[in-house]
Image (cartoon, grey):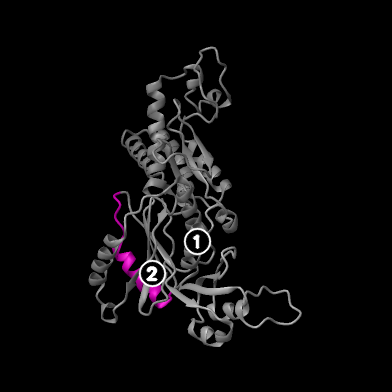
Amino acid sequence: MLSERLEFAPDRDAEIFAAVPAAPAVFVLRGGAAHFEPYVSKTANLRRRLHRLLGPPEERTKKLNLRDRVRTIEYSPTGSDFESGFLLYSLLRAEFPRTYSKRLRLRFAPFVKLHLENDYPRASVTTRLGRLNGRSLYFGPFVSRVAAEKFMNDSLDFFKMRRCVDDLHPDPKFPGCIYSEMKMCLAPCFKGCTDEEYATEVNRVQAYFDSGGDSLLRQFSAEREAASANLGFEDAAAIHVRVEKLTPILSQLPEIVRRLDRLSALMIQPSHLADSVALFRVEGGQISRPIPFGIQRSEHAKSQSIESRVQETLASFPQHKPKSVLEIMEHVALLKRWFYRSSRTGEIFFADAKGDLPMRRVVRGISRVFRGEKAEPEIAKS
């Protein structure tokens, strides 16, 4: 998994320290004895970190020193903090399969879950994903559970899908709840609607989440125009009020929030290799290992040439099926942690509903990341 390997001997420490780069890297220190647990970490300066861990011990200090235990140094240079974190995650997962999650302390991302496996589907907020082949759908990731709950509740105010969490056994004698009394629920609990009517409303909710709210916005716009054309100005005004209520909900929705199985993107990060950037492919929330993308100086003015090479690189990414739901949750947690930082290195570009990436924006993003320039403003979904 790591690209470089050195044998360590205390009497050759100066030579070994000089051989490693004074640059960011992920590394493993291994001892000669079988019982010696490998030391795995990342650092912004590998040479300085190894000198502290493997150099001559200082007197009267409690700093960790592994000089007399380590026999092998393995490392891989990295070009960004995200690459270091992703490689460290992969390495810890391989070295400590039973305890890596405690070492990483990942916080799983919140999602809005549409419970389609239920006879009467509903929505809820969760940080746990269900079966890979299950019918339920997940929309996110959100920055926090509070943000997810606010978006879900504000959105469901425009629909009449149930808010209760119980498994329903429809009974005409059931008194219902406050939502049915306020005409904000079709009330399948006491057969206030047919199963077909409720299924139609659930389909509207799914279309809303699938499209990031665009389906409902288009519906309101069409109804408003129709009302105006028929001189129903009061109805048009009422619909306009609903549009004004919906618009801020959608305008504040981060671009990363979408259906998980359609979360497709290309991330661009600085590379430790000269004249290169690192490309990470995201498919269904799962992150691929990086592939270097070389920048030829003569191509700076030839965006079409770069675009064709990006397409070739995308085609070369290996197809990797997730081993478990947990692996997807971990990858999304890493992606969410990077995306929602107040200041982040690198850029990300999301695929549209057809799965196509905005290639012209990708080419410009590659140029900015390569030159260390500021990213373009985030495009909010509206």
Residue 253 horizontal side relative to residue 300, left or right = right
Q: Position of residue 88 (x, y in %)?
A: 50, 64
Q: The magenta stretch spans which residues? A: 354-373
Which amino acid, by three-letter code, is at mark 1? Trp
Alpha-carbon neighbours of circle 1 within 10 Å: few (<14), some, or many (≥20)?
some
Q: For residue 298, what is the image quadrant?
A: bottom left
Residue 279 colored magenta? no
Q: Secondary structure at mark 2?
A: strand
Instruction: Write down the residue under mark 1.
Output: 338
Residue 364 colored magenta? yes
- Above or below for 143 versus 298: above
User: Which residue is situated farthest in the top direction here?
Assistant: 173
Q: For residue 223, what is the image quadrant?
A: top left
Q: In the rendered structure, find residue 278 and report the number of the disc placed on it.
A: 2
Q: Position of residue 215 (x, y in %)?
A: 36, 41
Residue closest to the eye, 233 or 190: 190
Q: For residue 106, what is the image quadrant?
A: bottom right
